[in-house]
Image (spheres, grey):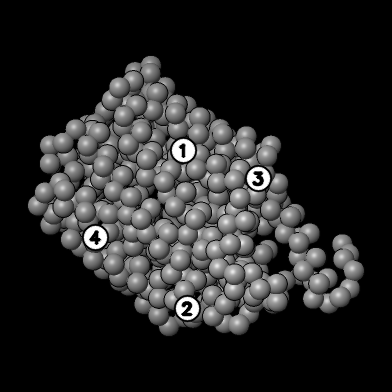
Amino acid sequence: MLEERSPGVLSRQLVLSLYLPAALLALGESLVAPVIPIFTKQFEVSFATASLVFVMVNVGALVAAFSAGYLMDTIGRRPVLLAGPLIMAAGSLMTPFAGTFTALLGWRFVVGAAHQAWQQARLAVIVDTAPYGQRARQMQWMMGVSRAGQLFGPAVGGLSAVAFGLWVPFVCHAVLVCAAVIPSVALIWETAPGRRGRMDTDEASFATQGWKPLLAYICTVQMLTFFVIQFCATLSRGGQEHGSLNLYAVYAFDMGPERLGLLNTAAIVCGLPVPFLTGYLMDRFGRRSVIVPGFAVYALALILMALTALLTLPVTFFLVTYVLLLATQGTTGGTMQVLGTDLAPPFARGRFFAIWRPIAQLGSTVTPALFAFIAEHAGYGYGFLYLAGCALVVAVGVGTVLGDTLAQYDREDVERRSRRTGEPPTG
C-alpha cells in the first residue's frame, strides 16, 4: 500500500528538526545522570527517600501529560514543542543550587514536566506528518540517536563533576537543551490536522463532537487492553535507566560518579544499534514481532540482576549484568510509543495523548517508589523480580491479545481509500 510521497527518514528536515535535537537533549540528560545520585546522597537521606528524586521527574511528566496533550489540540503542536526545552533548561540550571532536598525535588519536577511536553509534541508531529511505513523508523531512530547522544555523556558528566564540581554537568545540560530548540524554531511548522485543514470528512465530523467519540473509542476492549499493557510496560521500565538502577549501584556497591559514568557509557555502546534495527523491523514485519521478544529479553536481564542480590554474587557479575540490562532496554524503548501512536485516532490525537500518556507516566511515576519499598522490606532481588514480572505481562499480552496494528492499518487504509474514491475495497 503506497503512502503519499514524503521525504525519506534521513532527509535534511528530519536530521535537523528531529534527530539532532533528540541527540542534544539526550546528551544533556546523560551528563547529569551519574551526578544526581551523588548530589542526592549529600542530603543524607535513606535509599527510599533518595528515590523520590526520580519519582518527582516522573510526577512532573505525569502532571504535564494531560495538559500537553490537550494543548496540542487547542493551541497546536508547535508552541508546546518549543516551550518544553526552554523550561527544561531553566529547571536543570537551578537543580545544583537547590539548598534543600525539597527544593531539589521541585526542580526535578520541572525538568520532568518540560521533557514530557517536548516528547509528546514531537511524537504528535511525527504522527501528523510521517507515512505509516516510516513511523516506527522515525520514532525508533530518534531513540537511537538519543542513545548515541548519551554515549559519552555519563563518563564526561561524572569526570567533570569530580574535577570541577557537581554543578558543572547541570549547567552544560541547560546549554545543550537551549541549543537543541534552535533548529525547531526554523523548521517545525504547525502540523495539527484541524489547524491545517487536512482532515477528511469523517474525521472532521468526529472532531466537532469534542470528547464524546474519543471516550467511546477508548472504552473498547482493544483499547482498554492496550492501556493495561502500556501501564505494565512503564512499570517494568520506569526508573531503571539512570534511575533506581544507579541508586542500587551507589547504595549496594558504593560506586562513585566516575565509575558509574563509565558503566552507563558501556551499556549505551552495547545497545546503540538496537533502536535502528527495531525501527526497521517494526515497519517491515509489524509491531508485535519486535515488542514480544524485546520485553521477553528485558525480563530475562532483570531476572539476572535479581540474582546479584539474591545470591550475593561478586561485583563482576553485577557489572556485566548492569551493562546487559541497560543494553536490552533498547529492545523495548519506544516500541510502546509506536504502538500507541498507531492506535491514536486522527480526529483527536492530542486528546488521546492526554489520556494515554498519563497512564504510561503513572507507571513510570510509581515504579521507583515501589521498587524502593520492595527493596527495603524484602530485598533488592525481589524488587528486580517484580519488574521482570511486569515485562513478561507485556510480552504475553501483546503476543496473545493485541492484534498487529501494521496489518490492521493496511486494512483500514484500504477502506478509507474506498470511501474517498467510491471504488470497492481491494487488496
Q: Amino acid at mark 3?
A: Val
Alpha carbon of mark 1 to alpha carbon of mark 3: how far? 23 Å
Q: Amino acid at mark 4?
A: Ser
| Relative side of 141 to 243, left or right | right
Please name the residue that numbered disc 3 is placed on. Answer: 221
Name the residue rendered at 69%, 76% in the picture. Answer: 200
Q: Quadrant of residue 264?
A: top left
Front-most of residues 63 and 113: 63
Residue 16's disc is none
Q: Amino acid at mark 1?
A: Ser
Name the residue rendered at 62%, 62% in the picture. Answer: 213
Front tag of 4 and 3: 3
The disc, 3 or 2, on the residue closer to the chain's N-terminal end is 2
Alpha carbon of mark 4 to alpha carbon of mark 3: how far? 41 Å
The disc, 1 or 3, on the residue closer to the chain's N-terminal end is 3
Q: Determine the secondary structure under disc 2.
A: loop
Front-most of residues 364 and 318: 364
Alpha-carbon neighbours of circle 4 within 10 Å: few (<14), some, or many (≥20)?
A: many
Residue 188's disc is 2
The disc, 4 or 2, on the residue closer to the chain's N-terminal end is 4
**Do tag 2 and tag 1 residues touch (Cβ < 8 Å)?**
no
Alpha-carbon neighbours of circle 3 within 10 Å: few (<14), some, or many (≥20)?
A: few
